[in-house]
Image: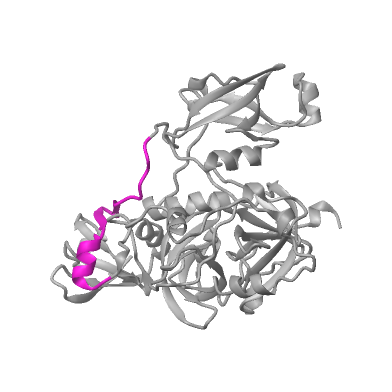
Amino acid sequence: MSKKSFVLVFVVAFLGALLAINSTRWLQLSEGASYHSIQERQKELGVQAVKTTYAASVPKELDFTAISDLAINSVVHIRSSYNATIKSNGFYRYKQGPGESSGSGVIVSDDGYIVTNNHVVEDAAAVEVILNDNRSFDARVIGTDPTTDLALIKIEASELPFMPYGNSDEVKVGQWVLAVGNPFNLTSTVTAGIISAKARNIGILRDENNYQIESFLQTDAVVNPGNSGGALIDINGRLIGINSAIASPTGSYAGYAFAIPVNLVKKVADDLLEFGVVQRGLLGIRINDVTAELAKQEDLSVVQGVYVFSVQEESGAEEAGIKEKDVIIGVDDKKVNNTSELQELVARHRPGDKVTIKLLRGTNEMEKVVTLKNTTGTTKIVKRAMEAEVEGSVFENVSTKEAEKLGIKYGVKLKKLGQGKWKEAGIEEGFIITEIDKTRIENVDQLKRLMPQLKGERVILLGVMENGDKTYYSIDW
């Protein structure tokens, strides 16, 4: 089969066709969570992220029964439902949906935090989580990150079996791994294989600012539609990756699957938990892989590494003294052979963090300490928007305190009523929107994404007033 005919696809379990398409001690993110790191939580519970002692731990007879028995209880089935939406192809408008899709997720804390893929829950009206013991919960989306295809969701439960973090840096090509998930709606499925390669960039993630991170673990463990968001584990039962994509000409397994390495997952999950959005620390350079051809063209002394094409003005890289035509060969004592490895290692850091870059300038090896900056060129931490203007009116996320007082779990409050459709519909300031056409509205970002999809429609807004009265409005959008 030619390389071009090999189509890379997301492992979204649409199961044939998309149809017409506890713990009370945790606070909502709008007020700040009671802890900021799932990694810290695991350590508190006696689970450490350890090196993979593969050579010493391989049993004489490969028996994965005990590990599988534990793992399947930490992997969940996720069902995402979508409401009918108005779409446009540039020539005419049409109605799409409602529909459902399904995937998998991994419990990473005892109180119900679950890591999955962004594409499993993105834009879902509702998310249902089914445990291996058949218990079912409504899930709240804490945050999503399309640039890594990761998401963090939460169910209200306690004393759950969770999967301990491993260390993807210590994963070796050729070692045994297990994939655990729910392919084709078949729950609690375990497959075995080996790590085929590391730091794979397969070109499936897209970002308008080119901030996507692809540094996949490649495996030949069987992964199919429905495995998205499921676990890739080592034979010690520790999470080393989140299954995300397959290489296939048909949409089903055809030899290779790809997982997001857990050391990146840890950082993204903790960012989403603490801030609601991922913190991206950037070097501020334009790069490409060093190849034999490039090495000959630019008279480089190596044929591996990351070539610096240009350096952004006032970036951390420029301030540290990195120059065009430098070749980066390491980050913080870790060897770097290609752009995927460099991007993953840098993406584990936040703005303001310092990283040590090892590079070659000609034949001279040197180190530069770079202070990473955010996407706006500062070292500040970025937090989820707490308020936003939509069609002339200002909305804000409902606070945890007010939500608890009103007996709701989420919502967006009309803070300042302006001229336009909201006023014409008779909506009063202080009204808290909890649902729009059966889609849960958890924050202002979600409200901003949803409303443009409803142009030309009459929609129903459900919610509650500041005095606790439940009410609804109809609005021609």
Quadrant housing residue 104: bottom right
Q: Quick one: which residue is furthest to the left in this view?
A: 467
Residue 392 within the magenta-colored segment of the rendering: yes
- Image check: 52 left or right of 24? right
Quadrant housing residue 435: bottom left
Q: Please tell me whether residue 132 is drawn above or below residue 213 in the rendered image.
A: below
Q: Please tell me whether residue 344 is drawn above or below residue 328 in the rendered image.
A: below
Can see residue 297? yes
- Image check: 429 left or right of 177? left
Which residue is more in the foreground, 131 or 3? 131
Which residue is more in the foreground, 400 or 33? 33
- Identified at 74% across, 31% down, the residue is 304
- Image check: 116 left or right of 177? left
Which residue is more in the foreground, 348 or 447? 348
Can see residue 410? no
- Identified at 60% across, 61% down, the residue is 238
Residue 106 locus on image (x, y percent): 54, 66
Q: Please tell me whether residue 371 is drawn above or below residue 463 in the rendered image.
A: above
Residue 366 locus on image (x, y percent): 62, 20
Quadrant housing residue 272: bottom left
Residue 345 locus on image (x, y percent): 58, 40
Q: How is the image coloured?
A: one colour
Picture quarter with the N terminus: bottom right
Residue 258 locus on image (x, y percent): 68, 57
- The span shown in magenta is 380-408
Residue 164 within the magenta-colored segment of the rendering: no
- Image check: 183 left or right of 6? left
Which residue is more in the foreground, 223 or 309? 223
- Identified at 56% across, 41% down, the residue is 210
